[in-house]
Image (cartoon, helix red, strand yellow):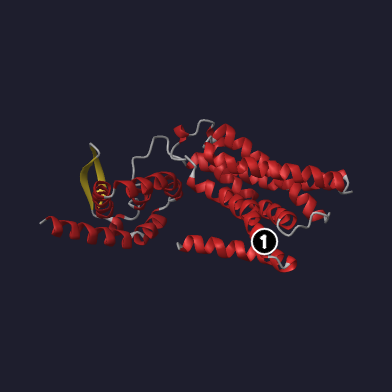
């Protein structure tokens, strides 16, 4: 059994155990585990992981709607409200506390409906990765349905919902500022490949050097030994294990530019350069072993 699957099962078991113990039923325990996956684990994974796994923030030209596309990252500003909404939905669906009309629970579901609908609309307009949209679609529908039910049943005044909505304004401002800054930090032209390692080479030359003039992808490039080594390692990887290399490159092409855009000072570049040393040493060992086998 994969350790990823084992961790997932343990998380679901921990979430479902209170309901299983309360009902003293194995069937209810399994049902609670399934519900925990649908209302807690999968929505949170989609919310947080989508900011890294499916964003296309490589350069300004890739953003069809300008800085608005960067909301896929800056939506993390709503994380506190997302966690509260998730806790409320967990209490209702998994712990079967549907008769409870506590203010935090009703308002949590209400805010969850607002945020989930916003994320779904954004996904439809700006990030149409259709398989991923199935998750925000059912999450938004679930929250909206429960919000309508709870608002009708509870006796909380309109002012409570207004205050809850106003409480999200700092997150909206943060998300707007974060998206704008992310967009400004993106390069004007498409990056060419080894984003983080290239950015690390902008450190102090007495540390990250020496530099060489080398031809890479038909272009003359100035690169340090670390970058040259990792280029050669990637070429070897692509030739021998194309499928795993393709999966790595697909993920790295999305994460790399975002990380590289944050490396703006020579001192930070020095730190990243040193942090990449183990990867450089590993690449050298692999390349050396490949040459030995070839001879």
**Image-quadrant location for residue 203:** bottom left
Residue highlighted by disc 1: 27
Question: Where's the C terminus, which quadrant?
Answer: bottom left
Query: How far across and down, in percent of the image, does residue 20 sit?
Result: 69, 65
**Image-quadrant location for residue 118:** top right
Left or right: 244 as drawn, with respect to 30? left
Query: How far across and down, in percent of the image, does residue 113 sit?
Result: 71, 44
Residue in front for this viewpoint, 206 or 32: 32
| Residue 75 visible in the picture | yes
**Is 141 rendered above or below residue 109?**
above
* Residue that sits furthest to the left in the current view: 295
Q: Secondary structure at mark 1?
A: helix
What residue is rendered at 48% in x and 47% in y?
53
Residue in front for this viewpoint, 274 or 14: 14
Query: How far across and down, in percent of the image, does residue 217 sit?
Result: 25, 39
Q: Rate crowding at label 1 as few (under 14), some (14 to 19) or many (20 or more) other CA atoms within 10 Å.
A: few
Left or right: 27 as drawn, with respect to 224? right
Query: How far across and down, in percent of the image, does residue 97 sit?
Result: 78, 57
**Is 283 rendered above or below residue 122?**
below
**Image-quadrant location for residue 29:** bottom right
């Amino acid at each position: 059994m994969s350790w990823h699957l084992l961790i997932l099962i343990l998380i679901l078991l921990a979430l479902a155990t209170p309901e299983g113990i309360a009902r003293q039923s194995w069937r209810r325990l399994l049902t609670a585990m399934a519900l925990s996956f649908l209302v807690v684990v999968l929505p949170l994974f989609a919310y947080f992981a989508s900011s890294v796994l499916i964003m296309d923030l490589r350069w300004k030209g890739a953003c069809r709607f300008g800085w608005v596309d960067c909301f896929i990252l800056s939506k993390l500003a709503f994380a506190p409200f997302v966690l509260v909404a998730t806790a409320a939905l967990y209490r209702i669906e998994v712990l079967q506390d549907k008769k409870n009309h506590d203010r935090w629970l009703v308002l949590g579901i209400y805010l969850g409906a607002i945020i989930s609908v916003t994320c779904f609309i954004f996904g439809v307009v700006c990030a149409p990765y259709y398989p991923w949209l199935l998750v925000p679609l059912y999450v938004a529908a679930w929250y909206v349905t429960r919000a309508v039910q709870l608002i009708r049943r509870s006796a909380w005044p309109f002012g409570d919902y207004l205050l809850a909505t106003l409480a999200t304004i700092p997150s909206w401002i943060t998300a707007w500022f974060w998206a704008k800054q992310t967009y400004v930090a993106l390069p004007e032209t498409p990056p060419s490949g080894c984003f983080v390692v290239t950015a690390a080479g902008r450190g102090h030359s007495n540390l990250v050097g020496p530099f060489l003039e080398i031809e890479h992808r038909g272009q003359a490039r100035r690169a340090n030994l670390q970058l040259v080594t990792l280029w050669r390692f990637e070429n070897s990887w692509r030739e021998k294990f194309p499928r795993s290399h393709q999966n790595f490159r697909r993920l790295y092409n999305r994460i790399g530019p975002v990380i590289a855009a944050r490396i703006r000072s020579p001192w930070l570049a020095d730190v990243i350069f040193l942090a990449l040393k183990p990867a450089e040493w590993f690449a050298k060992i692999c390349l050396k072993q490949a040459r030995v086998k070839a001879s």
